[in-house]
Image (cartoon, helix red, strand yellow):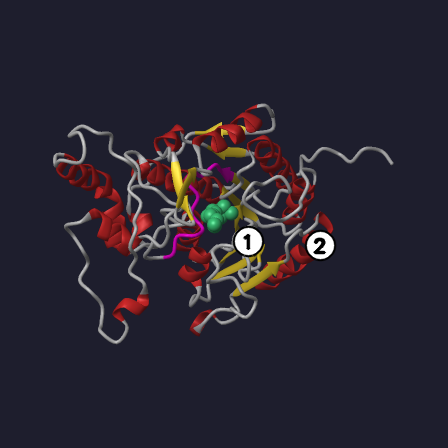
Amino acid sequence: MRWVYSPAHVLHDPVHEVQFGVPVPAYEVPARAEAIREAMEADDSFERIAPSEHGVEPILRVHEPRMVHFLEEAWAQWAEHHRRRAAGPVDHPDAPVPALIPDSFLHPAIREGMGSSPEPRQNPVARAGMWGFETMTPIGPGTYRAARAAVDVALTAADLVLDGQPAAYGLCRPPGHHAPRAAFGGYCFFNNAAIAAEHLAGATGERVAILDLDYHHGNGTQQIFYRRANVLYVSLHGDPDRAYPYFAGWAEETGAGPGIGATLNIPLPEGCSDRAYLTELRRGLEAIRSYRCPFLVVSLGVDTHREDPICDFALTTPVYEEIGQRVRGLGMRTVVLQEGGYHLPSIGPSVRGFLRGVDGTATPAPPA
Ligand code: OKP
Ligand code: ZN
């Protein structure tokens, strides 16, 4: 299988994220993608490809242009804002510029019954609070370039499949599935999977299915396609009653308007085992089969692993191969894109196992 990687992901290198008001070491770090790269490069059945530049247009087909524009200029505006404040009595003028993390958000209740507020333009903290939805997704000096590169990785993987490869993998970082049309958050800036799905649909006129296997519900992807009949969204994830992103992912959410029936959520309990997961996966794959379309985009998060530090499922490394084989059983043209996975020692083998399953090169089971 061919797979796509860009070294530009290292430009997004957050030090801290803010959880429950407290800075903690960032989880979504460059070492994640490097661990996966190393596992892939140790396996001869994979061939690494560099991404090609696709420009900003495919992003603008999915995301609010004002948000894209904000992300593009956020760092420069924040650095300037910070320098001006630091020139005061508090700080040294050339104190290092910390990452931009909003502290105040445009909660819908603030403007209830009053119409919308103008977009803030002067203060980068206000802008970040308008376009961001939480405090765990810092913007640093290279964040925009890394996020753009992740989209190029996704689109290049999609192009491989459009050009006739049965499957391809894009090692996207930062991830994307939490970003709705008009916001960033959940470690995500641009929704790589949604942009790739739109690219496949736009290039062929065919319908596309998305299978989201990350531990977290892909609220962004669901939102982008919620009213659309030509993109099916299927997700297995930690039940939002206990798990981030808390405000989407219930089984009762099945789409709206023309998209009714084109969203399927499968929320799962704490401690979910290999066996329970495979049983529930069957329902997801059935829905994709019934949808009858040629293309599949997989949002592959391996934070379902039992060792993952921020999640609570109990999957073991070998099951990812089995999951990949079952996805292969759909017989669809498949673009696999990286989402989460935070336990550095297991993410490489888990991702590689899944891809070997999809590719039909899985290690044969030991003789009984
Ligand atoms: C991104 B991806 C809440 C912890 C949640 C954010 C998780 C983002 C996951 N206290 N932190 O879906 O793996
Ligand atoms: Zn996740």
Q: According to the image, label 2 marks what residue?
A: 276
Q: What x and y, as percent, mark residue 12?
A: 36, 34
Q: Which secondary structure lies at badge 2?
A: helix
Kindly identify which numbered label has been placed on residue 234. none
Quarter of the image that includes the N terminus:
top right
Q: Depth check: 202 or 278 in front?
A: 278
Q: Who's the residue at 53% across and 55% down the image? A: 243
Residue 94: image location, x then y, percent: 18, 28
The amino acid pointed to by label 1 is Leu
Q: Is residue 178 magenta?
A: yes
* Region of the chain picked out in magenta, as a range: 169-180
Residue 52 as seen in the image, left or right of residue 65:
right
The residue tagged 1 is 211
Residue 313, percent from left and from top:
63, 48
Q: Is residue 354 above or below residue 130?
A: above
**Residue type at numbered disc 2:** Ala
Estimate the x, y position of residue 287 in percent, counting from the top left: 61, 62
Considering only vertical position in the picture, is 67 above or below 354? below
Classify 10 Å Cα crowding around label 2: few (below 14), some (14-19), many (20 and above). some
Left or right: 353 with respect to 217? Answer: right
Mark pair 2, 1: CA separation: 17 Å
Taking the magenta stretch, the answer to whether it contains residue 216 is: no
Asked if residue 243 is positioned above or below residue 141 in the image, the reply reads below
Kindly state the secondary structure of the residue where label 1 is placed: strand
**Residue at (45, 58) in percent of width and height:** 219
Asked if marks 2 and 1 touch (Cβ < 8 Å), the reply is no
N-term mark: 2 or 1: 1
User: Looking at the picture, does residue 23 appear above or below residue 215?
Assistant: above
Tell me the chief SS of the magenta region. loop
